[in-house]
Image: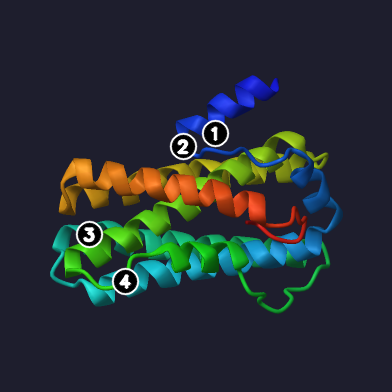
Amino acid sequence: MSKEQELREVQMLGLKLPTDPRWANLAEMELEEILTDHAYCEQKAATSCISLIQAYPEKEDMVKKLAPIVTEEWGHFRMVLSELDKRGLKLGRQRKDEYVNKLLEFQKKGGSREERLLEKLLICALIEARSCERFRLLSLHISDEVLRDWYHKFMVAEAGHYRLFIDLAKQYMPEEVVRQRWQEYLEREAEIMKELELRGDRMH
């Protein structure tokens, strides 16, 4: 696939900057580390959905839509644990996620409950979009055929989650407000990607 095609694929997710394809090769060389980081990403995704449900129980439609995502993300966590076990690898310690921390720093503080919800939903959508893009790279570029197929399944799931979070944002806030703030997040996310070192032991 050409660089132009890869860029178009990334732009479908809205991302402004594609991951350097070398990242997939670095990740394959540090499989235990990337699987460990992947496991904790799935765990944190489930926790984020639980936190949204706890913070906004009155948003009944959101609660109904996020409840199965909690189950799915926790299932993904268990899938990664199983893959580690199959390969004789160990789950390491959770590491600080610089990417997510930088996104959280960009989050607007204060505002109404709906405005704070928008910030949370867009951050979740962005993390899912970048995860989807990186799972796609792994599904295309690593040498292990079993893992290529495995990561393709994760890519499809993350794409669905990304769309769900965007749709929820538009459900609870005016579409123009969502669109403008989403573009601001995309611009900042591209800057964050440039700031961070390319590492094969991190999903983001």
Q: Amino acid at mark 1?
A: Val
> What separation in Å lies between label 1 and label 3 (alpha carbons)?
27 Å
Q: Earlier in the sequence, mark 1 or mark 3?
A: 1
Answer whether labels 2 and 1 touch (C-beta < 8 Å).
yes
Locate residue 139 relative to residue 183 in the image: left or right. right
> What separation in Å lies between label 3 and label 2 (alpha carbons)?
22 Å
Is residue 192 shown to the viewer in this render?
Answer: yes
Between circles 3 and 2, the one closer to the viewer is 2
Query: Does 91 sit above or below residue 108?
Result: below
Q: Earlier in the sequence, mark 3 or mark 2?
A: 2
Label 1, residues with CA under 10 Å away: few <14, some 14-19, many ≥20:
many
Q: Earlier in the sequence, mark 3 or mark 4?
A: 3
Q: Secondary structure at mark 3?
A: helix
Q: Secondary structure at mark 4?
A: loop
Q: Quarter of the image containing the C terminus?
A: bottom right
Locate residue 179 relative to residue 130 in the image: left or right. left
The residue wearing badge 2 is: 13
Residue 98 x, y percent position in the rendering: 61, 67
Q: Nearer the viewer, residue 55 or 157?
A: 55
Tell me the tag on residue 10. Answer: 1
Q: Residue at x 75, y 67 (%)?
A: 85
Label 3, residues with CA under 10 Å away: few <14, some 14-19, many ≥20:
many
Is residue 42 shown to the viewer in this render?
Answer: no
Q: Earlier in the sequence, mark 4 or mark 2?
A: 2
The residue wearing badge 3 is: 62
The residue wearing badge 4 is: 109
